[in-house]
Image (cartoon, rainbow, N blue to C red):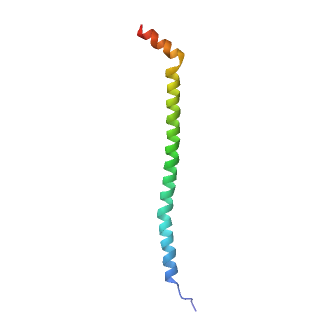
């Protein structure tokens, strides 16, 4: 004799798998986007700081004063 199938349990399992198939990739994309955003923001801050140091260096001020005269 074959045991009777529990279709309600199978349906709930399929719903859980469907939700996981939608939610998990969305969470992965969101986490990846957030880490990439933070990485690019840190890189931009470093570039701004580097440019500010170059603009304020004594060598560049001598260059600017020689150009303006």
| Residue found 51% across the figure and 69% down from its top | 17
Q: Where is residue 30 in the image (x, y as percent from the top left)?
A: 48, 53
**From what the image shows, is residue 38 above or below residue 56?**
below
- Camera-nearest residue between 34 and 13: 34
Residue extending farthest left? 68
**From what the image shows, is residue 41 above or below residue 31?**
above
Q: Quadrant of the N terminus?
A: bottom right
| Residue found 49% across the figure and 81% down from its top | 8
Q: Quadrant of the C terminus?
A: top left
**From what the image shows, is residue 24 above or below residue 34?**
below
| Residue found 46% across the figure and 9% down from its top | 66
Q: Position of residue 19 (x, y in %)?
A: 48, 67
- Camera-nearest residue between 14 and 30: 30
Residue extending farthest bottom? 1
| Residue found 52% across the figure and 22% down from its top | 54
Q: Where is residue 5 in the image (x, y as percent from the top left)?
A: 53, 85
Q: Where is residue 7 in the image (x, y as percent from the top left)?
A: 49, 82
Tally the marks.
Answer: 0
């Amino acid at each position: 004799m074959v045991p009777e199938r529990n279709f309600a349990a199978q349906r709930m399992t399929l719903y859980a798998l469907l939700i996981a198939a939608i939610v998990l990739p969305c969470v992965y994309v969101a986490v990846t986007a957030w880490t990439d955003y933070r990485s690019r923001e840190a890189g931009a801050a470093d570039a701004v700081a580097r440019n500010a140091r170059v603009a304020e260096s004594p060598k560049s001020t001598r260059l600017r004063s020689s150009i303006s005269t």
